[in-house]
């Protein structure tokens, strides 16, 4: 997925050179920062996709929990029925 985060490497390079870095150092730092931003930062689209995935996972978990509770209730009522007949 292409990220929509813009990083102005030219402006960053100029700031680094103004701070005393050589041109090579400034360009290397700018490239490293651009790569870091591209690889590590999440965009709004990334977060929307993550939220959608989590919602699906939660719905599946809810279904499994309800199914298990229903099964336990059936077993519990069956045991109660047997105990009522025995006692």
Image: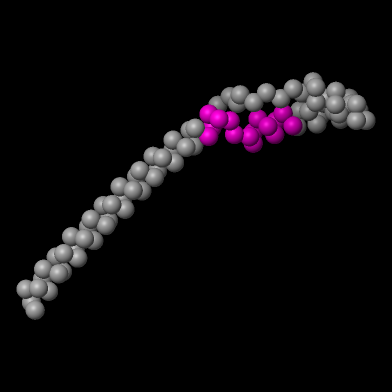
On screen, 71 above or below 21?
below
Question: Camera-side residue: 72 or 38?
Answer: 72
Q: Give the left or right position of residue 75, taking residue 85 as reference.
A: right
Magenta highlight range: 33-47
Q: Tell me where residue 21 appears, x and y as whole percent.
A: 90, 30
On screen, 47 above or below 66?
above
Residue 5 lies in what quarter of the image? top right
Q: Is residue 24 visible in the rendered structure shown here?
A: no
The N terminus sits in image quarter: top right
Q: Is residue 50 visible in the rendered structure shown here?
A: yes
Majority secondary structure in the magenta region: helix
Q: Is residue 35 magenta?
A: yes
Q: Tell me where residue 22 appears, x and y as whole percent.
A: 91, 28
Residue at the far bottom in the pictured view: 87
Residue 85 lies in what quarter of the image? bottom left
The C terminus sits in image quarter: bottom left
Residue at the far left in the pictured view: 85
Give me the residue at 47% from left, 37% from top.
51
Q: Give the left or right position of residue 9, taking residue 62 as reference.
A: right
Q: Tell me where residue 26 appears, x and y as whole percent.
A: 85, 28
Q: Give the left or right position of residue 20, taking residue 84 as reference.
A: right
Q: Give the left or right position of residue 28, taking residue 68 as reference.
A: right
Give me the residue at 78% from left, 28% from top.
30
Q: Tell me where residue 59 appears, x and y as whole percent.
A: 35, 43
Give me the residue at 10% from left, 71% from top.
82
Give me the residue at 49% from left, 37% from top.
50
On screen, 59 above or below 11?
below
Residue at the far top in the pictured view: 10
Residue 29 lies in what quarter of the image? top right
């Amino acid at each position: 997925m292409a990220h929509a985060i813009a990083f102005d490497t030219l402006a960053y390079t100029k700031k680094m050179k103004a701070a005393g870095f050589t041109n090579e150092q400034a360009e290397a730092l700018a490239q490293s920062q651009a790569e870091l931003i591209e690889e590590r930062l999440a965009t709004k689209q990334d977060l929307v996709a993550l939220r959608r995935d989590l919602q699906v996972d939660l719905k599946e978990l809810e279904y499994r929990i309800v199914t298990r509770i229903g099964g336990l209730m059936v077993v519990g009522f069956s045991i109660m029925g047997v105990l009522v007949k025995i006692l």
